[in-house]
Image (cartoon, helix red, strand yellow):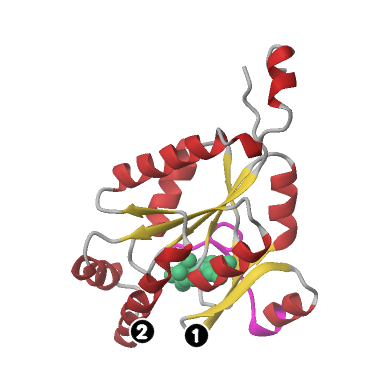
Amino acid sequence: MISMSKGFLLIISGPAGTGKGTVCKELLKRNKDIVFSVSATTRQPRVGEVDGLNYYFVTKDKFESMIEKDEFLEYAYVHTNYYGTPKEFVMNQIEKGEIVLLEIDVQGALQVKKNFSEAVFIFLLPPTMEELKNRIINRGTETEEDINRRYENAFKELDFVGNYDYFVINDVVEDAVLDIEAIIKAEKLRVKRHSDIKNKVLKGGK
Ligand code: 5GP
């Protein structure tokens, strides 16, 4: 059987409060062939967040020196902090044939789109904007100012959905994960992700 497809980038974006974190966590738990790209950020850790697991929490100086050394695949300034994807890890994993999950904002996704034509872009949406606001408030980790900023940004980010390949509505987490798994399954079967299919069939798929 032909199984191995080339590695590719899977980008998931969506406004704060759409539940990207929860959906990505479940996706990773169920799919061992997907690896998560841990971003660097200058934001303070939230309660329960672990350095090196959720993010690499770095100072502004450190982040800026990483920019200078060209160590980011993409980076952006989001909600008053820097966020960026370390390049080396991602490139190594793609080389190994892995699917690399990037949970990044719309600005970062647009940068990736310029350089990685084979990446897959998914935009996660809340069922309603009212539900989105409730989710931001219920997280309880942000100040009122932060909540309002994130909610306003959510409206602006919705304008970017047209730049993505797929949209997934996160009403029930399980359903959103199933939708993403269906997208991945189809993407793995793209002819362009395989080299020399005919030869592999002739050799019995090896
Ligand atoms: P949060 O502070 O809630 O963890 O993340 C805020 C926003 O930054 C989210 O939209 C998240 O997707 C985005 N983000 C996280 N890591 C990265 C990254 O490496 N690059 C970019 N461009 N955005 C990121």
Can see residue 182?
A: yes
SS at circle 1: loop
Q: Horizontal and vertical percent for residue 53?
A: 57, 57
Can see residue 46?
A: no
Q: Which mark is residue 197?
A: none
Answer with left or right where residue 66 lies relative to residue 180.
right
Q: Amino acid at mark 2?
A: Arg
Q: What residue did someone put label 2 on? A: 149
Residue furthest left as drawn: 130
- Residue 184 magenta-drawn? no
The residue stretch that appears in magenta: 46-62
Q: Which mark is residue 80?
A: 1
Would you identify the image quadrant in which residue 20 lies?
bottom left
- Vertical placement of 26 versus 57: above or below? above
Q: Are marks 1 and 2 in contact (CB under 8 Å)?
A: yes
Q: Horizontal and vertical percent for residue 4?
A: 65, 29
Answer with left or right where residue 64 lies relative to residue 130.
right
Rendered residue at 38%/69% (across/down): 15
Rendered residue at 72%/17% (across/down): 206
Query: In terms of depth relative to the viewer, which is nearer, 22 or 5?
Result: 5
Residue furthest bottom as drawn: 145
Q: Horizontal and vertical percent for residue 100?
A: 60, 49
Would you identify the image quadrant in which residue 193 lies?
top right
Rendered residue at 33%/66% (across/down): 17
Among numbered discs 1 and 2, the one appearing first in the sequence: 1
Q: Amino acid at mark 1?
A: Thr
